[in-house]
Image (cartoon, rainbow, N blue to C red):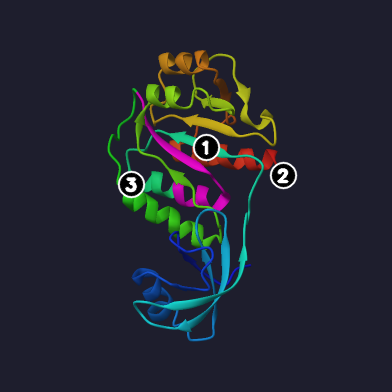
Amino acid sequence: MFESVFYTPEIDREAIRHVLNEPESQHAIRVLRLKSGEKVTLVDGKGSAYDCMIVNPHQKRCEVEVINRLDGVGKRDYRVHIAIAPTKLNERTEWFLEKATEIGIDEVTPILSQHSERKELKLERMDKIIVAAMKQSQKAYKPILNEMMSFTDFLKKYKDVKAQKYIAHCHQGEKMKLKEAKACSDVIVMIGPEGDFSEEEVECAIRCGYKACTLGNSRLRTETAALVACHTIHLINE
């Protein structure tokens, strides 16, 4: 387990000393009341963790000395990418981002579909939620949060990406269970809005190489379905 974790994406990999930015310095010194000589861990969001010791406990420019660096912390041989139509209530999408980050997710793309009710997002706030969850769950990799894009633009952008691709929906028709996906392979799962994807969208995705899938017998809320999809992929790979 890491010591107190601080997010430092701008850290110099070769430097012996590093100064935390003002928000992280305040959190370390004013909130946690850390002192000179105490151990902390810095993560860069790219898989590296730095064991450090506080040498100058300043509230605005806390300086630390790097003792050791670990690379590839928590690296997996598969990636999880969830494309989700944001919920009408922001809190539900934010809840998904927090919990998915804790469980482990690599990329999230908000998508705008035919039945979407929310068409604008506060990405800066969502990114802060991801960072907080990454630190709390002691992750060294920060999930990628993409700008919102239309359903069709998403299909076009990831057309040539090598991954297992699934679209979850509640319409009638032949569907596989997501838990039957192959292990050790990148996965993209599309999750629709409260009103589900339209049948036209499902057919379009299938023509683009996606497989229709089900997440179980229960009808799930959007954010629950997205989290279940994320967790299912991890269970497959255990």
Q: Residue at x 43, y 37 (%)?
A: 109
x then y, percent, for residue 174: 59, 15
Which residue ends up furthest to the right in the rendered image?
238
Element carrying mark 2: loop
How many angstroms separate mark 1 from mark 3 (CA)?
A: 17 Å
Magenta residues span: 96-113
Amino acid type shown at disc 2:
Glu
Which residue ends up furthest to the front in the rendered image?
14
* Nearest to the observer: residue 123 or residue 41: 41
* Nearest to the observer: residue 137 or residue 155: 155
How many angstroms separate mark 3 from mark 2 (CA)?
A: 32 Å
Element carrying mark 1: strand
Q: Residue at x 34, y 71 (%)?
A: 22
Amino acid type shown at disc 3:
Leu
72 part of magenta stretch: no
How many angstroms separate mark 2 from mark 1 (CA)?
A: 18 Å
Mark 3, residue position = 123
Mark 2, residue position = 238
x then y, percent, for residue 62: 41, 78
Q: Quadrant of the N terminus?
A: bottom right
Quadrant of res 84? top left
Are the residues tagged 1 and 3 within 8 Å (C-beta)?
A: no
Q: Earlier in the sequence, mark 3 or mark 2?
A: 3
Residue neighbourhood size for the residue with mark 3, other residues' Cα within 10 Å, grouped as few (<14), some (14–19), many (≥20): some
Mark 1, residue position = 81
Residue neighbourhood size for the residue with mark 2, other residues' Cα within 10 Å, grouped as few (<14), some (14–19), many (≥20): few
Amino acid type shown at disc 1:
His
* Nearest to the observer: residue 182 or residue 162: 162
Q: Earlier in the sequence, mark 1 or mark 3?
A: 1
